[in-house]
Image: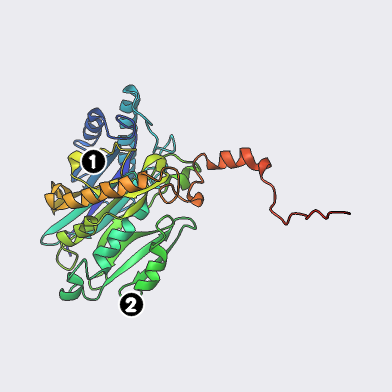
Amino acid sequence: MGEKITLSVIKADVGGYVGHSSVHPKLLETAERSLAGNKLLIDYHVARVGDDINLIMTHKYGVDCPEIHHLAWNVFLNCTETARELKQYGAGQDLLSDAFSGNIKGMGPGVAEMEFEERKSEPVIIFAADKTEPGAWNFPLYKMFADPFNTIGLVIDPKMHEGFCFEVYDLVNNERVEFNLPEEMYDLLVFIGAPGRYCIKSVYSRTSNEIAAVSSTQRLNLMAGRYVGKDDPVCIVRCQSGLPAVGEALEPFANPHLVAGWMRGSHIGPLMPVGLNDASPTRFDGPPRVVAMGFQLAQGKLIGPKDLFADVAFDRARQTANEIANYLRSLGPFEPHRLPLEDMEYTTMPEVMSRLKHRFTRVGPKKAKVSGV
């Protein structure tokens, strides 16, 4: 057995430039300086999508390592200081505490980590999204690892033919459940079809028991008790050699699916795959964006990134997303563009309902008037 590598992706929104659309270059420079030369890390890469900073790090200390999480926390604190100096919008909004508590989970930033032994060739894709929530990965992860119309390897690759195990989190009750596919496919779909509550946390190969994918599942509103921005999730997918090919992992995004988020985290919109240079959502603070950064790992070194959605083959997907966005925007504050009421709990809806409560009266049969009595 060789030595295992840990790939950690930790993200946070610590200040937008301008508004919620991007990250000021000085914040990215601060993140680079904060990670440079750190002896805990084998390698690192600082990226951004929309107004979120993504720290991509490799090391040998396993998942949930307090020192790695503390390092990321300090990076975000340093970036927040820079953001406040530049009066960036929402400086430090994803940092829900003033003091690190040993694990960055539950403190605001999103986390996706996996530990594995590097294969002879180790291609990985880091997906990062802005203006949406963790459930946005349900549809593409299902397509990658369960749909033979998307992933032909499920049919013709003996290493994939046994299927995959999906770990699903219930974000409301803080519970988890596993499903073995393909035989439990229908049971899985009952849950992941409700992405606002049930999210695919990880996927494992049933042939090798190897970790294949992992996502961030932090929900800011559930942690903070109020609306403090959408969660802008990240996801790691390993590819090839018994796992989906790179092209199979990208294919689900060729047909933009609808996700929750967009303006004020309160709308439904298409998830648009874009190159890194186009990951600055401005139209109605959107539509939601996703980028795909490809890396080859070599002894923990991050060889890349390759900007995978910059391919012109995704131009039609972007056109389709814009057409969907046009239609949904025409609905304004009406559902299904605006989220349903049960998902508006952390917006102005509770305050409005409280203020108007006394004006609501019970509906009942009206008493008929009897003439001549």
Secondary-structure class at tag 1: loop
Can you identify the residue that label 1 sits on? 279
Q: Residue furthest right?
A: 373
Where is 292 relative to 147, above or below? above
Calculate the distance from the C-alpha at mark 2 to the C-alpha at mark 1.
38 Å
Can you identify the residue that label 2 sits on? 183
Three-letter amino acid code at the position of disc 1? Ala
Query: Residue 273: where, in percent of width, then height?
Result: 23, 49
**In this figure, which colouring scheme has been used for the structure?**
rainbow
Could you tell whether 289 is left or right of 345 in the image?
left
Where is 74 relative to 345, above or below? above
Query: Residue 309: where, in percent of width, then height?
Result: 17, 49
Q: Is residue 70 visible?
A: yes
Where is 301 relative to 162, above or below? above
Q: Nearer the viewer, residue 294 or 189?
A: 189
Query: Residue 248: where, in percent of width, then height?
Result: 18, 62
Secondary-structure class at tag 2: loop
Q: Nearer the viewer, residue 263 or 131?
A: 263
Query: Residue 218: where, in percent of width, then height?
Result: 39, 49
Query: Residue 40: which quarter of the image?
Result: top left
Could you tell whether 349 is left or right of 147 in the image?
right
Name which residue lies at 48% across and 50% down.
343
Nearer the observer, disc 2 or disc 1?
A: 1
